[in-house]
């Protein structure tokens, strides 16, 4: 009954999502603040009669809003059911192992190898520098590669790349191979390369409303790239599911994308909390990597990430650790509200 294909899959394991609310959840990089208050008004008055019909398969209005905000054309915008789906479609559309391996950082978002296995794409993990930063030169030394994907900032390290580094990569890398920059965490202080998508036709930027816009539960991701790349993503979408983004998600996302002022204040608060939290944790003797994301990657000498995770869990706080050689002495801590981080600091002081 089970296909050989299916039997070979090793699925991605998301962070714990306890349903009993008994934990302080700092493990899946969700935003601690509510989404734009304007969304509430929409939901209160939503005319459910509309749900009889299928949603707009092209998400025209939403793509128009995104295009306006990021100063591109609608034809350069693709929307998806979470950015995970945009990633999945991109892997399918642009990566072909006949042209070599897909390159990505050794420690990065662990869904990338899962999609590679799913689609039969060979990949190569590129070592990070000893300070966990990404060195792009080595990517160019690999002559046989079918594409590159890098999150900026990287996860789980939180370290951001300078746009100059990405420009260097774009200028030197063959223009007929894709470079995907996953900007899931860009709202928290990194510099976006969306403005380069006009010049570099092989650059695809992937974004999500899950982190900066407090809408992880909604599931909306989008991509910005050349018309050629965007059209290809529509072909893939329409070969899987014509309506991945439902009608309510389209409307809510339009509102969120337009409420720049509200989200600016939310991200500023998170950035300020992150900076104070990082320096307080350092004062307690922890090694905290410099983060431009809504999480920090931190460890304490002499204790493994797993132990830290277990000790914090006992005290009602969930963080994430990775049982992977090279990063097993770290935990990834999502930045919550100031009082939540103070609670964690109290517990951290006892470790
Ligand atoms: C680097 C990175 N990219 C993409 C995603 C997927 O986000 P979503 O599917 O919620 O848009 C995540 C989620 O944690 C992530 O860490």
Image (spheres, rainbow, N blue to C red):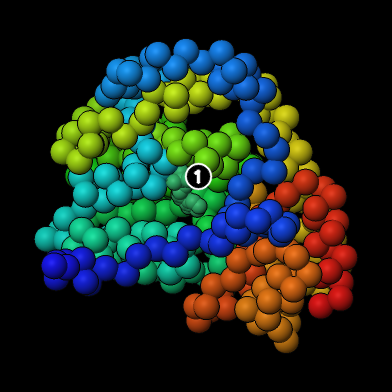
- Name the residue located 26 percent from the left edge and 51 percent from the top edge: 91
Task: Locate residue 318 relative to residue 51 in the image: left or right.
Answer: right
Tell me where residue 205 sits by quadrant. top left
Q: Which residue occupies 51% across, 15% down?
A: 46
- Residue drawn at x 23%, y 31% as measured from the top left: 242
Q: Is residue 305 above or below residue 207?
A: below
Apparent side of residue 127 relative to residue 260 in the rendered image (left or right):
left
Vertical arrangement, residue 106 with respect to residue 238, above or below: below
Viewer-side residue, 35 vs 179: 35
Say if 7 sits above or below 136 in the image: below
On the image, the x and y values in percent for residue 86 come to 34, 42
**Quadrant containing the C terminus in the rendered view:** bottom right
Indicate the position of residue 273 as horizontal and vertical percent values: 78, 47
**Callout 1: helix, strand or loop?**
loop
Instruction: Let me know if residue 116 appears in the view.
Output: yes
Residue 137 visible in the current orientation = no
Percent coordinates x, y for residue 79 in the rendering: 36, 31
| Residue 282 in which image quadrant | bottom right
Q: Residue at x 17, y 68 (%)?
A: 2
For label 1, count other residues whose C-alpha is less than 10 Å away and answer few (under 14), some (14-19) or many (20+): many
Quarter placement of the N terminus = bottom left
In the picture provided, is 334 more to the left or to the right than 56?
A: right
In terms of depth relative to the viewer, which is nearer, 261 or 237?
Answer: 237
The residue under label 1 is 184
Is residue 30 or residue 324 the one in the foreground? 30
Residue 266 x/y as whole percent: 71, 34
Q: State left or right for residue 288 relative to residue 98.
A: right
> Is the CB of mark 1 within 8 Å of ligand 1?
yes
């Amino acid at each position: 009954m089970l296909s050989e294909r299916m039997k070979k899959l090793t699925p991605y394991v998301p962070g714990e999502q306890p349903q009993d609310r008994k934990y302080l959840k700092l493990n899946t990089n969700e935003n601690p603040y509510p989404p734009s208050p304007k969304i509430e008004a929409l939901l209160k008055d939503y005319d459910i009669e509309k749900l009889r019909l299928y949603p707009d398969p092209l998400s025209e209005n939403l793509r128009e809003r995104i295009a306006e905000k990021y100063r591109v054309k609608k034809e350069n915008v693709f929307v998806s059911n979470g950015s995970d789906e945009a990633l999945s479609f991109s892997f399918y559309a642009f990566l072909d192992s006949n042209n070599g391996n897909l390159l990505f950082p050794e420690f990065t978002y662990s869904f990338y190898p899962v999609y590679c296995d799913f689609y039969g794409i060979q990949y190569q993990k590129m070592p990070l520098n000893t300070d966990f930063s990404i060195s792009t030169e080595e990517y160019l030394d690999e002559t046989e590669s079918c594409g590159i994907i890098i999150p900026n900032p990287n996860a789980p390290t939180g370290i951001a790349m300078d746009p100059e580094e990405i420009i260097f990569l774009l200028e030197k890398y063959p223009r007929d191979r894709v470079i995907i920059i996953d900007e899931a965490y860009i709202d928290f202080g990194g510099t976006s390369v969306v403005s380069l998508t006009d010049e570099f036709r092989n650059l695809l930027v992937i974004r999500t409303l899950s982190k900066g816009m407090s809408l992880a539960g909604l599931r909306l991701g989008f991509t910005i790239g050349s018309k050629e790349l965007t059209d290809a993503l529509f072909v893939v979408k329409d070969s899987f599911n014509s309506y991945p983004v439902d009608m309510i998600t389209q409307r809510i996302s339009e509102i969120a994308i337009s409420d720049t002022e509200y989200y600016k204040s939310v991200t500023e608060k998170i950035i300020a909390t992150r900076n104070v939290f990082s320096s307080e944790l350092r004062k307690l003797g922890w090694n905290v990597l410099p983060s431009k994301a809504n999480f920090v990657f931190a460890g304490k000498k002499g204790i493994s990430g797993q132990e830290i995770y277990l000790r914090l869990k006992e005290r009602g706080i969930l963080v994430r650790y990775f049982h992977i050689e090279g990063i097993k002495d770290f935990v990834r801590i999502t930045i919550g509200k100031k009082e939540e981080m103070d609670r964690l600091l109290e517990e951290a002081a006892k470790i």
